[in-house]
């Protein structure tokens, strides 16, 4: 529990201070609007302020977009009665000036005018809080202004380091998101989303007005009540702000950038503003780092000469805040500066503050607080802050009374309680190369290349030694899939692959499952467009048992009759369930239209007719035709010895003989398909549009140009998305897919939309395809697509099993097992001209297949 501050040394008890000062008029309308007025006739000036209890932490699904800040920019841009520029002119004509600011929990608009302009200032504020129109053309201009402001934040090391400190210190609280927002989120803001936020949060029960100066309170209240009186109270969205969890250990983030000086921040979490310990922490910050007589300035700057500037501060919002110490210094002095700052903090904890030093700090704090009230604007700011913090217009007086009552023991106590190592966050932004990072010797294994062995029976074995973790991954891949099927037996490869695990001549289905799981491992099978196979993973100590189990399910399947019926029923259910997936239905229809009833026109699941017609005898025959060593690549990656693996595989697979049957040659697909159009009907509400084009083979380098086109057309910043989803609002989802194959594959655009918009969506898709064929990608789009493609590959390859599968498939499909090391460079070297040429070649003026999935008559009804 927190101890209370030292008993007051003055006769004034904070409890005796009234919540409303005697010179304040406080009024509340029936709709919840609060009006605060202070008459001050000491100068012929008025400060009128409108406060909205919404800031960046209230942005809900738009958290991180800077929506509140964007509104701050827009509210002076015009209302339903005042056009763009009119407000500026009126305030200037009244001899005043205006501005606004946004914080985490508030947005404040203020106008300072001579007393003769008070009615104009109040009228403008009442107008913008209710009737702002947020003109679209003005929003586009302001978005560019705000983006430049974001650039300024990044370019300014002080602002950048301050932002990064909050992102480091807060892990859960929305205080970790910068008020101004992040470009990636901000760029998606629309006028409509801003209007929704405005109309929701700028309601009378979430707004209050503060007017201070040479006015008559009755007249001010009457004017504001008349302006807002007819506005209805609104239901405000519930606000849940998660508590920042306590630190279990200190956090430290040190970054380098092209800056001249280092910026260092130390921070500790402290309670919310109304907690009784916060006044002591405020005075502690004043004592440590406010002014030239402060401890940090005298010791760290003047005596030791370590910094160019130094200070201490508190940030005390409505929730958990921060106590901090910050410095600017030469980058190579970072370690010394950190040590010096922490030494002063330790001294504060170890030794009580001399009474005279405390008295000085208290006087500084009180004087600085009172100085803010010299102007009408300062008084209005004080009253507004009091009301939003505590609904107590004398909160700052109560706070100053608590400050004046502090004793040296109070400062020492809060320093010991809050300025602890586990509660500490350090963030530093240093010049490039400023800090020497010592090399760390860790036990590791050198990266070993993949080794290819070819056994006498034709089996190709790929081995990669990786001893980082004690696992071994097996991937056995064989050519097959829909390229080895016909309309009559479509789906047989997938059914056969599932049955590989349902029993062998030596093991039942249950025994296979029990055996692999007793090893803490896993085993699975798969079937696809070009291949089928078996995958497994075991601990390195169980390598031999894992290898033997993989060999058994691959070479000796029994295809038990009961398991056959069960798995066939499961696959038939999957075919029926596919009709519930509108996008899958659309792609299947497009593929049939593009390729006909062969190759990629078939589906891995098969059809109801083809799978129902399969017999138990069909599966061993299909397996016998495909499962032979010359049609297989086995990859074994992990904590193994390559030579030992080769010997073990020769013993286990050496007797595997080539089948006398052979896989059928690849089917022949007409080079130039006839453009076709197909429409399917489902009992669904939505529609899907898929436009398909014949594309490349796996072996062709221009497949990567189409890969990059897919990436560029599938992110939220793509022209396709921005046009169809954001600008026109026509689609639920929109994107592209590229499928290169052993035979020419396809490139497709797709979108999900409302049935009545399908024709317009199709038109927009074809317009984008035509544009890409003529113009290709811009340099920005190309670089972003490359980064996404390369990043995805890097991320996926960190999984050794995935790398084993990719490498094995490359070898199986004729690309070579080393292709994975080459394709990254191919993508890096691609030019905009090469991408444009590929788009022009494959994205023909007329799409070769259009598939539309529409609701049937029952769904439309």
Image: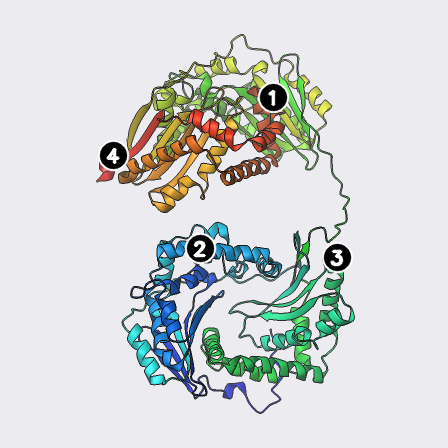
- Marks 4/2 in contact by CB < 8 Å: the verdict is no
- Marks 1/2 in contact by CB < 8 Å: the verdict is no
SS at mark 4 in the image: loop
> Looking at the image, is mark 2 or mark 3 earlier in the sequence?
2
SS at mark 2 in the image: helix
The reply to whether residue 588 is in sight is: yes
> Which circle marks residue 143 in the picture?
2
* Residue 13 percent location from the top left of the image: 54, 88
Query: Which residue was labeled with disc 1?
Result: 816
SS at mark 1 in the image: loop
What's the distance in space between the residues labelled 2 and 3, CA to CA?
39 Å
Q: Which label lies toward us, 1 or 2? A: 2
Q: Which label lies toward us, 2 or 3? A: 2
> Which circle marks residue 332 in the picture?
3
Of residues 779 and 556, which is closer to you in this image?
Answer: 779
What's the distance in space between the residues labelled 4 and 3, CA to CA?
72 Å
What's the distance in space between the residues labelled 4 and 2, CA to CA?
43 Å
> Looking at the image, is mark 1 or mark 2 earlier in the sequence?
2
Figure check: 714 above or below 68: above
Q: Residue at x 40, y 34 (%)?
A: 771
> Looking at the image, is mark 3 or mark 1 earlier in the sequence?
3
> Looking at the image, is mark 1 or mark 4 earlier in the sequence?
1
Residue furthest top as drawn? 660
* Residue 233 percent location from the top left of the image: 31, 69
- Marks 4/3 in contact by CB < 8 Å: the verdict is no
Figure check: 366 above or below 826: below
Figure check: 599 above or below 640: above
> Looking at the image, is mark 4 or mark 3 earlier in the sequence?
3
Callout 3 crowding tier (Cα within 10 Å): few <14, some 14–19, many ≥20: some
* Residue 516 percent location from the top left of the image: 59, 31
């Amino acid at each position: 529990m927190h101890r209370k501050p030292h008993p007051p040394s003055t006769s004034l008890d904070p409890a005796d201070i009234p919540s409303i000062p005697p010179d304040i008029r406080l009024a509340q309308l029936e709709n919840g609007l609060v009006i605060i007025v202070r008459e001050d006739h000491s100068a012929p000036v008025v400060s009128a302020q409108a406060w909205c209890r919404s800031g960046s932490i209230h942005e809900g699904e738009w958290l991180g977009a800077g929506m509140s800040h964007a509104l701050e920019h827009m509210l002076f841009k015009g209302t339903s009665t005042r056009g763009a520029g009119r407000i500026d002119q009126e305030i200037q004509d009244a001899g005043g000036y205006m501005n606004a600011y946004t914080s985490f929990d508030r947005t404040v608009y203020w106008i300072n005018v001579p007393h003769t302009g008070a009615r104009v200032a109040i009228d403008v504020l009442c107008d913008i809080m209710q009737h702002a129109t947020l003109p679209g053309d003005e929003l586009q201009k302001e978005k560019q202004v705000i983006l430049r402001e974001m650039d300024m934040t990044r370019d300014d090391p002080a602002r950048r380091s301050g932002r990064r400190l909050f992102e480091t210190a807060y892990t859960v609280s929305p205080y970790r998101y910068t008020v101004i927002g992040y470009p990636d989120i901000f760029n998606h803001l629309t006028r409509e989303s801003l209007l929704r936020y405005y109309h929701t949060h700028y309601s009378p029960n979430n707004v209050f007005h503060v007017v201070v100066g040479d006015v008559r309170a009755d007249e001010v209240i009457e004017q504001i009540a008349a302006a807002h009186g007819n506005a209805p109270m609104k239901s405000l969205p519930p606000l849940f702000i998660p508590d920042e969890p306590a630190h279990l250990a200190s956090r430290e983030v040190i970054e380098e950038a092209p800056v001249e000086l280092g910026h260092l921040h130390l921070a500790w979490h402290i309670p919310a503003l109304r907690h009784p310990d916060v006044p002591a922490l405020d005075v502690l910050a004043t004592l440590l780092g406010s002014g030239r007589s402060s401890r940090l300035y005298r010791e760290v700057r003047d005596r030791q000469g370590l910094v160019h500037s130094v200070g201490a501060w508190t940030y005390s919002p409505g929730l958990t805040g921060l106590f901090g110490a910050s410095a600017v210094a030469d980058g190579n002095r970072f370690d010394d500066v950190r040590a010096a700052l922490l030494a002063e903090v330790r001294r504060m904890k170890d030794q009580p503050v001399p009474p005279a030093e405390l008295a000085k700090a208290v006087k500084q704090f009180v004087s600085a607080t009172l100085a803010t009230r010299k102007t009408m604007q300062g008084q209005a700011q004080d009253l507004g802050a009091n009301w939003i913090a505590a609904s107590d217009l004398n909160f700052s007086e109560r706070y100053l009374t608590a400050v004046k009552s502090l004793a040296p023991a109070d400062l020492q106590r809060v320093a010991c309680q809050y300025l602890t190592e586990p509660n500490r966050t350090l963030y530093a932004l240093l010049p490039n190369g400023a800090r020497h990072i010592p090399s760390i010797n860790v036990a590791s294994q050198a990266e070993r290349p993949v080794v290819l062995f070819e056994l006498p029976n034709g089996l190709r074995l790929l081995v990669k030694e990786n001893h980082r973790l004690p696992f071994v991954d097996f991937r056995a891949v064989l050519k097959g899939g829909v390229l080895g099927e016909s309309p009559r037996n479509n789906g047989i490869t997938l059914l056969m692959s599932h049955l590989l695990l349902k029993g062998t001549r030596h093991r039942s289905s249950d025994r296979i499952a029990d055996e692999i799981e007793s090893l803490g491992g896993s085993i699975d099978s798969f079937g696809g467009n070009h291949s089928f196979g078996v995958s497994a993973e075991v601990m390195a100590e169980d390598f031999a048992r894992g290898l033997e189990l993989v060999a058994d399910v691959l070479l000796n399947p029994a295809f038990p009759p009961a398991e056959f019926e069960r798995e066939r029923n499961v696959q038939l259910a999957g075919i029926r369930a596919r009709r519930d997936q509108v996008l899958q239905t659309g792609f299947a229809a497009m593929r049939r239209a593009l390729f006909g009833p062969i190759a990629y026109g078939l589906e891995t699941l098969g059809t109801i007719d083809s799978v129902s017609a399969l017999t138990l005898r069909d599966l061993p025959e299909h397996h016998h035709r495909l499962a032979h060593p010359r049609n297989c690549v086995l990859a074994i990656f992990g904590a193994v010895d390559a030579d030992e693996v080769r010997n073990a595989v020769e013993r286990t697979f050496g007797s595997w003989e080539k089948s006398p049957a052979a896989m059928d040659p690849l089917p022949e697909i007409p080079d130039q398909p006839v453009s076709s159009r197909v429409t399917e009907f489902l009992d669904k509400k939505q529609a899907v549009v898929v436009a398909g084009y014949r594309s490349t083979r796996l072996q062709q380098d221009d497949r990567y140009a189409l890969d990059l086109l897919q990436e560029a057309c599938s992110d939220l910043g793509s022209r396709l998305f921005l046009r169809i989803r954001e600008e026109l609002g026509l689609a639920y989802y929109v994107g592209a897919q590229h499928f290169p194959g052993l035979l020419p594959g396809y490139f497709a655009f797709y979108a999900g939309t409302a049935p009545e918009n399908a024709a317009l969506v199709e038109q927009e898709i074809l317009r984008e395809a035509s544009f890409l064929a003529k113009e290709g990608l811009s340099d920005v789009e190309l670089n972003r697509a490359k980064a996404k493609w390369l990043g995805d590959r890097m991320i996926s390859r960190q999984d050794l099993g995935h790398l084993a599968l990719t490498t094995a498939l490359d070898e199986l499909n004729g690309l070579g097992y080393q292709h994975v090391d080459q394709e990254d460079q191919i993508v890096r070297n691609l030019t905009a001209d090469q991408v444009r040429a590929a788009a022009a070649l494959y994205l023909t003026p007329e799409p070769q297949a259009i598939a539309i999935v529409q609701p049937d008559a029952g769904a439309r009804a």
